[in-house]
Amino acid sequence: MLYRRLLNVPSWGFDRPFREFERLRREMDDLYGALSGGTLPMPSAGVFPLTNLTEDTKNYYVRAELPGIKSNELDIQVSGEGISISGERKIPEEGENVRYHRRERDAGKFSRSINFPGQVDVDKVEASMENGVLRVIIPKSEAAKPRQITVK
């Protein structure tokens, strides 16, 4: 199209594939909007709480983001193979006559289980919570810790 307008020459169809993709995208958007009642669902992470599992030579470390949840509202269980974190996220209602324009914060019960790559010592687990981040230190079992071998 640019060639045709500026140089007054045929475009040889360079813009045609992209125009068709744009038309197809618009039609799919219209179809999806009609099927969903005109509103598109907001994407969500699908997993709560967001969690990291790291390790060093002595321990595994679990860090979970739990904003607005108090430590006494959590149920944390550690077994020889993994950890389970569960609780309930409560979000107060905004009011009776409130209309949401965007609602991304979900409330409700949650449970998150993560397996460890090796065996752990469940008797020495420590947990702390600071600024909405849960930190659990899980010592590795003696059998799982690496051993220094000296060469003779």
Image (cartoon, rainbow, N blue to C red):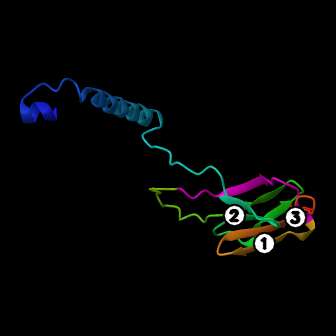
Q: Residue at x 42, y 33 (%)?
A: 34
Q: Which numbered disc flags the more N-terminal residue, 1 or 3?
A: 1
The location of residue 18, given as percent across then percent down, is 30, 31
Mark 2 or 1, which is nearer the eye?
2
Q: Quadrant of residue 112?
A: bottom right
Q: Residue at x 34, y 30 (%)?
A: 21
The location of residue 122, given as percent across then percent down, is 90, 64
The location of residue 128, given as percent across then percent down, is 76, 74
Q: Which mark is residue 111?
A: none
In this figure, which residue is indicated by the disc labeled 3? Answer: 148
Q: Quadrant of the C terminus?
A: bottom right
In this figure, which residue is indicated by the disc labeled 1? Answer: 72
Q: Is residue 91 above or below residue 82?
A: below
The three-letter code of the residue at mark 2 reads Ala
Per the image, label 2 sits on a secondary structure element best described as strand
Q: Residue at x 81, y 66 (%)?
A: 59
Q: Is residue 14 above or below residue 54?
A: above
Query: Left or right: where does residue 84 sit relative to residue 28?
Result: right
Q: Which numbered disc flags the more N-terminal residue, 2 or 1?
A: 2
Q: Quadrant of the N terminus?
A: top left
Per the image, label 3 sits on a secondary structure element best described as loop
In this figure, which residue is indicated by the disc labeled 2? Answer: 64
Q: Give, as a single range, the part of the protein colored magenta.
A: 104-122
The three-letter code of the residue at mark 3 reads Gln
Mark 1 or 3, which is nearer the eye?
3
Q: Is the residue marked by circle 3 packed among few (<14), some (14-19), or many (20+) residues within 10 Å?
A: few
Q: Residue furthest front?
A: 152
